[in-house]
Amino acid sequence: MKIAIPHNFRYQLLFLLSIAAPYLDNFELTISVWSFAFLVSVSRSYSLSLIKLIVPFLAVLTIAIFVSFFYIDYQKYFIIRDIVYLCKPIIGFLLGYQLCKRNYENAFRLIVNTGVFIAVCHIIILFFAIIVFKASTVADIRLYAGYFSDYEIYVFVIILFHKKFQLNYSPKKFLILAVIVGFSALMYLARTNFIQFIILFLALKGYFVLNKKSVTIFLSIITTSVIGYFIVLSLNPRRDAEGFEGFLYKIKVAPLEPFKTKINREDYKDFNDNYRSYENIMTIRQVTRDGWVPTVFGKGIGSQIDLKQEVGLGDMKLRFISILHNGFMIVFLKSGLLGIFIFLSTIFYFFVRVRSDNEIIHYINLLFIGTGFFMIISNWVFLGFYNLTETKTILIGFLIAYREKFK
């Protein structure tokens, strides 16, 4: 039996490795893999659409670098790390764009197959976590198997709408792929992933186009969500509960967690449950207290926030941090209100639709509209495109290239 190797196999492999690397939660490894893949797939030309998305990220980085010259006491390690960190989305967009140009023929099948591979790996890890390491709580399962997976949500939605992307799976194959990726995505038990799925699904159904039907749908969702939340409140899940009750507690505190303006850091429960808000409060206080110049232009690359006490973050205890949980706050810290104003254009970018009669382009447009709405939430609670382990940038760069080919 002769095995046929696709002529673009190495670029398919590079795409798979680039998507998989961030799941290992090693920033140095991710940047190394992305940089290598970028260098071996450099394109001769780039579209204006891609450049429009990248320019705001470059502007934020440029402002942050310029401002840092006025703060000579910053440590070189944090300066270099911030530069690489702020460059990550730019590298991701370019890499995705380049790899798509090498994989036009099987673009969406490559996206889905990569997602299925990631999902199978995740399910295997889940099995070992539960059977071998006896993980039984929500916290333990997420500790062993991962905290979120934006990429798998995109893949799951594409599978659900496979006919619209001209994948045309048989009913049996559709069911198998949907179950594998859907189960894996569900078992991250991530609130932001649930929100992401709802937003992307509604976007591809066309419900973000304002009409009577879409208004009815959104009112129904809001009503159901409010009723569901009050049911959770009435159940009063315990903070230290395990299993499903522990998950319900996370839902209970979710609405206020990123938005509280007063936190008692002497109260462990209040501090731990609302830590993201605490970061935001400290960032705003420490940037604005030095006057209007840092408020407008930020404090540059290498700047850090003093948490006033050591906090357990991952496997480290830190008092001074330069990377925050909030994408808007990290831009504010590095490049001020000017940077925030520029950064907002990266969200508005996804609401601009490319006109075309091609069905795939139409649904890529809808997927991008959903992405725009999701990025408002993702930037506030999970760093958006700046998240160390996200892979959305590669997928978006990939889809921009695919859309440009058929425009």
Image (tube, rainbow, N blue to C red):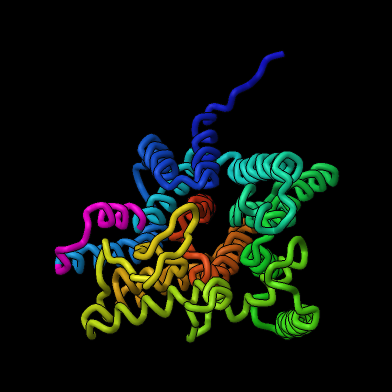
Q: Position of residue 47 (x, y in %)?
A: 39, 54
Left or right: residue 62 compared with residue 120:
left
Highlighted magenta segment, given as a residue range: 70-85
Q: Where is residue 371 in the image (x, y as percent from the top left)?
A: 56, 66
Q: In this view, does 164 lie above or below 16?
A: below
Residue 81 in magenta stretch: yes
**Nearest the eye: 320 or 46:** 320
Q: Can residue 163 be seen in this view?
A: no
Toward the top, the furthest residue is 1
Toward the front, the furthest residue is 266
Q: Which residue is drawn at 43% across and 47% down?
A: 27
Q: Is residue 145 above or below residue 248?
A: above
Toward the right, the furthest residue is 172
**Nearest the eye: 161 or 387:** 387
Where is residue 198, by image quadrant? bottom right
Q: Which residue is drawn at 63% across and 47% down?
A: 144
Q: Can residue 292 be seen in this view?
A: yes
Q: In which quarter of the image is the N terminus?
A: top right
Mark count: 0
Q: Main secondary structure of the magenta part?
A: helix
Q: Position of residue 117 (x, y in %)?
A: 65, 39
Q: In this view, does 29 lie above or below 188?
A: above
Q: Residue at x 67, y 70 (%)?
A: 250
Residue 39 in magenta stretch: no
Where is residue 367, by image quadrant? bottom right
Left or right: residue 273 compared with residue 322:
right
Q: Which residue is drawn at 80% across and 78% down?
A: 235
Left or right: residue 302 compared with residue 116:
left
